[in-house]
Structure formats: structure tokens, C-alpha cells
Image: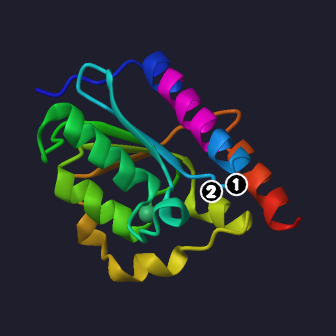
Amino acid sequence: MCKSIAEDRLMEFADLAIDLAVSSVKADGLPFSAVILNQNGDLIGKGVNQVAKHLDCTAHAEIQAIREASRTENNASLAGTTLIASGEPCALCYLAIRMAGIQKVIVLSSRYEAEKHGFNYLRTYEYLNESFFHDLEVLTLDHGRKLLPFQLAKMNLSD
Ligand SMILES: [Zn+2]
């Protein structure tokens, strides 16, 4: 029922996620981006963190990508899709991911790598329990540039 997206295709969109995150940081934003692929591996949504820009505390990258993907698909359900995130989703975003029915999450930089670069949202996970992750696939993809957006952002923070 769910075919898996080829590795090189995932890597291509991991590249895009990193490019989006780098652009976001260069525009004084945050190093968080997300892209969503349908079951054929086609891009249906992307987003970066726009909390400050939109004065909207829910405008995290993943949620922005979900909004765009749902508009693309004309469907609030994104069942069977894959989300790639430059930084691991926070609890709010994991919830939105579950509510959208996204099947698989691919994390580039982990919550701990984000924390090391000045973005600490570890406390948000206290609201989740392990059962939450049943039947949600969360994978990491080791990408050579995965830390770049966070390194650039950390330099901005220490300016
Ligand atoms: Zn979030």
C-alpha cells in the first residue's frame, strides 16, 4: 500500500530542506524548515518558521508546510505522506503531524543537536508520552550539511 520513496529522492529533498533553512537564517529567521512529499515522492508543501514574521506562535516550519500541503492536496488529511524537517519537530509539531496523518518523519538535526546550537525545546516533549509515537515512523537521515543552518543561526545569536 505504501511504497517507499527512493533514497536519492529523499536526499534531494533533504538538500532542499537545508537550503530553505539556510535562506531562512540569512533572512534573520530561524534554522527550521520542513518539506512534505506525497507517496510518489513529489513535493506538495514546504515551510520555514514564521512565528516572528506572522506574529503567530503556531507558525512553526512543519505546520507551515502542513498548511501548504493541505492546500495543494485540497485535503486536511495528509495520510501516507513524508515530512522532512531540518530540525526535529517539537511536541506541537509532532501533534500536528499526527493530526494530519503524516506517515513518516525524517529528521536531519536532532532535538539535541538543535539544543547544542541554542534552540532548546526539550521541555515540549514532556507533554508527549511514548504511546504517541506508535505507528509514526521517525527516521534520521545523515546529511553532510545538516548542521549548517544551526551553525549559521548560532553565529547570529552570538552577534
Ligand atoms: Zn514545532
Q: Position of residue 97 (x, y in %)?
A: 28, 55
- Residue that carries the numbered disc 1 in the rendered image: 28
Q: Secondary structure at mark 1?
A: loop
Seen as rendered, the residue at the extreme right is 159
Label 2 amino acid?
Answer: Leu
Quadrant for the C terminus in the image? bottom right
User: Mark on residue 18?
Assistant: none
The magenta segment: 12-21
Q: Position of residue 30 (x, y in %)?
A: 62, 56
Q: Of helix, strand and loop, which mostly describes the magenta segment?
A: helix
Q: In this figure, which colouring scheme has been used for the structure?
A: rainbow
Drawn side of residue 135 relative to residue 34, left or right: left
Measured Cα–Cα span from mark 2 to mark 1? 7 Å
Q: Where is 38 relative to 36, above or below?
A: above
Q: Is residue 15 magenta?
A: yes
Q: Where is 65 relative to 80, above or below?
A: below
The local crowd at label 2, few if under 14, some if 14 to 19, many if 20 or more residues have their Cα within 10 Å, is many
Label 1 amino acid?
Answer: Asp
